[in-house]
Every structure is written in structure tokens, then in C-alpha cells.
Amino acid sequence: MSFEERSKLFVNTFQEFTREQQDEVLKQILLKCQPLQLRLLYSELKPLLAVDFVASLPKELAERIFSFLPVNALCRAAQCSRLWRERSNHNAIWHRLCVLNGWDRFDDDRLQTPHAAPSQGPSISSADYSLLKPATCRWKKIYMRALLLDKNWAQGRYSVAPLLRGHREPITCMDCNGSTIVSGSSDNTVRVWDVKTNRILLVLGPPHTDSVRCLQLKDSLCVTGCADGVIRLFDLKSGRCLRSFQGHSGGVEHLSFDGSTIISASTDLTVRVWDAETGRLVHTMTGHSDEIQLLVAHDKLVITTSWDETIRMWNVKSGTCLLTLRGHTEAVYCCDFDNQKIISGGGDGLIKVWDAQTGDNTFTMVGHSGEVYCLKFNDEVIVSGSADSTVRLWSHQGTLLHTLEEHIGVVRCLCLLGNRLVSGGDQKRIAVWDVKEGKLLSVVYRNPALLHLMWADDTKLITASPETPGTITIINYW
């Protein structure tokens, strides 16, 4: 009897057995098999035993299961089949992933077509640009674009727009809302620039009769403070000066404007509150005995720091001084605050944390060997920049977390955007840092030798130089 006949007889006999008898025969056969034969058997059985559970489950349950997958696994699942792609590309899943990374802020579709192909840093591969193609759900598209933007910052991939030239003297102040830049200069003018086209829109010269020392942009309005002691409110749509505010007997050095109220600080050592709509002087607040170094406002509270080594908190509504904080032994150069705490840095190299309700000095951070010129904080960390060329990261309990060393010269500017920190200063160097890891991500060298003004958002970095003539640099990461 041939092999074919014997095997056919065996199969026919097997089929005649009961289910229990078949199971017993199979066990006996498996016990007689060699390892290589068992491996062959496994490879043959594996595809026969595979079950597409996604096709068997209700859509909502399958999407719930996919929601527990990490991003890499989710993307691999989308490659399995058309059905798996449909289930894994679900808006609720990708929205949750965007929220976890803080990318839900891109809901307003800010990440559209890139501004320009990056000209600095490693070139972007075609695979990276393929991320920009439409995805099957909106939040997955947002996730992919935000991921690419993050890579651009981390790897130093950016483009530099043509320098904004026009000021004849150093730029003394600058503000931006993402689409419009306003800059003030010692040449007695304010210039308004379009971020997208890199072109000048307006020159607000007269009625400024002296150096423009400070300004603030709010919607289509711009408030300027001048060394001639006058505050002016401009409509940027028409370029017309709507109103002038006179009362200071010295130059106006600092401003805050929320659209209805203007707060100003002057070399006459006073802080004044104005009604922007009527031009009426609401309050004149006095207390500082030396030059006011900084003014920062939140809601109805404003803080000023001074060369008299004090920090004062004022109530804008009542015009009264709520707190006077003493503890620094030199001028207080920088400060920021919220409802719970006030954080200050000074010429004594110290960073102090104060209770915003009681005025108690809760922590003093010691570490810098030079003046502290800038600081920022969020819920996770406090960041300080100093004349000792270092940036330091501190916990809110006063513990030094990291000392970041990359700068040469004074660190003058900080921008803290989530987990991304941008620091700028002297010697043509801007550094981008990962705050959680305390590590350097990239360095930007395309900026003037000195840097004293910096503005940043998710997609761009804008710097101004104190050199003559003053120029503005726009660095695009998208």
C-alpha cells in the first residue's frame, strides 16, 4: 500500500472516531512528534487560530480597548487592516493623547502649513513632512503636527526671516501678539510689523517727542510710555493717536494695559492708574524712594520692584499699597507672582519666595554668584537667569534641581512654555532647554551680539537688539 493510500485510510478512520476518541488520538500523535515537527505544526495552526476580535466587538468597545494603547502601538494597530485603522483613528483617543502632552491648545488650528522650510539645523526628511498629510481624524492630525513642531525645537530646525530694519537707534521695548509686532526705540518712534509678511505696517512717530521707553499691545490698541512723561494710546488700524495721558513729572518707564485700564510707573517714583476710555487719572500711588525697576500686573493687583530694595504690591481698584516686602540687600531686578506666591530676584544674587497674602518670606534660594536679572515660574518649576552666565531650575520648596551652563555673559531673557525653556543673553547665543530633564536641546546662534528683549510662542521666537541701529529677528520653528 502506497503512502497516499495509507494516509487517506488514516484520515478516513480518524473521521469515523467520536470527538473524545479524536482528542485521544491527537494527544498520542503529539507525544510521538519531534520538536521540529511540533514547530511546523504550530506555524500551520497559528493563522487558523487567529481571531479578529475587533470585527467581533461593538465599535465602542473596540475603541475603548485601543484607548489604552501607547502611541507607537496605536500606530502599528492602524496598519493591520482597514477596520483596525478606522477604530484606532478615533478623535476621542487622540484628543486624550493631545491632552496628556499639553497639545490640546492647538485646537484653534494654529499648526497649518509650515511658515517656511527650516534653513538651520538638520534637514527635515520627506518622512517627517509626510506627517503633515491629512489623517483620518482631526486630533490625530493635530498630534502629528505638534510632534513635528516639538522635534523642530528639540533638534534646532528653524528658518530665519529677513531682519526687520527701520529703527535708527536701539530698540528699547517690544511686544507681540503672534501676528503683529510693535517696537519702540530711542529714535522717538514706534514701528508696527506684520509677522507673516515681515513688512512694516505703520510708523508711529509724532507725537512722541523723546525716546519711547515702554509699550504694550492689546488687540488693535497700543499704549506707549515716553521719556517725555506722556502716555499715548494708539489705534493700530488707522495709526491715529486716540488719547494722551499727562501727569507724570518724569519719563514713563513701565506700563501695563488690559484694554480698559492703564498702569504706569515713572522716574518720578510714582505708580499711576488711568482710565483708558476717558483719560482720567484714577489713582496716584507713592511709596518707592528710588527708581522703579519693574512693573507686573495680574487682574486687579500690580507689583513694582525698585532700586530701594523693596517690592510693593498695590490694589489697582483702591489705589492702596497692600504689601511692602523687604529682604533683598540690593536692587530687585525681576519679579513674578500669582494668587499664592511672589517670586523675586535681585542684585544680591538671591531668589526669594514670598506669601502673596501675608508677605512672609517663605524660601530664599542661594546659588547664583551674580545678579539675577530674569525669572519665570509655572506649577512645576522656578527658573532664574543671572550675570554668572547660568540658568538655574528650582523646586517650589527652594531646592536647586539643575544648573544649566551654556551661556557666555549675562543671561537677560527667559521664556517658559510648558516643558520648554528658552534663554537668551549676550554673545550671540539663545539656548533651548528641556525643563524636566534639565538638559540642553539646541542652541540658536542667528541673533545679534547682545540680546535684551525676547518673545516666544509655540511656533516662533522673536528677539530685539539694543545695538544701533536696532533690528528685530523672527525665528520660525513651523
Image (cartoon, grey):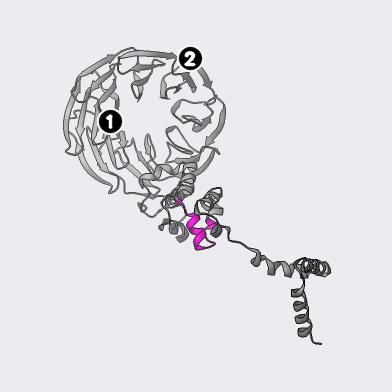
Look at the image and say whether residue 175 sits in the magenta stretch. no
Q: Does label 1 or label 2 sit earlier along the sequence?
A: 1
Q: Is residue 240 among the parts visible in the rendering?
A: yes
Prevailing SS of the magenta stretch: helix
Q: Which residues are magenta?
A: 75-90
Question: Residue 111: x percent and y percent?
Answer: 38, 49
State left or right for residue 256 relative to residue 149.
Answer: left
Q: Residues within 10 Å of mark 2 (few under 14, many from 20)?
A: some
Question: Residue 191: x percent and y percent?
Answer: 24, 38
Look at the image and say whether residue 81 sits in the magenta stretch. yes
Q: Is residue 459 among the parts visible in the rendering?
A: no
Q: Secondary structure at mark 1?
A: strand
Q: Residues within 10 Å of mark 1 (few under 14, many from 20)?
A: many
Residue at 23% from the left image edge and 36% from the top image edge: 220
Q: Amino acid at mark 2?
A: Asp
Q: Quadrant of residue 244?
A: top left
Q: CA distance from mark 1 to mark 2?
A: 32 Å
Q: Secondary structure at mark 2?
A: loop
Q: Which residue is mark 2?
A: 360
Q: Quadrant of residue 126?
A: bottom left
User: Which of 131/397 is in front?
Assistant: 131
Above or below: residue 414 compared with residue 230: below
Q: Amino acid at mark 1?
A: Leu
Q: Which residue is mark 1?
A: 215
State left or right for residue 278 relative to residue 135.
Answer: left
Residue at 67% from the left image edge and 65% from the top image edge: 46
Q: How many marks overall?
A: 2
The quadrant in which the N terminus is found is bottom right
Residue at 24% from the left image edge and 30% from the top image edge: 223
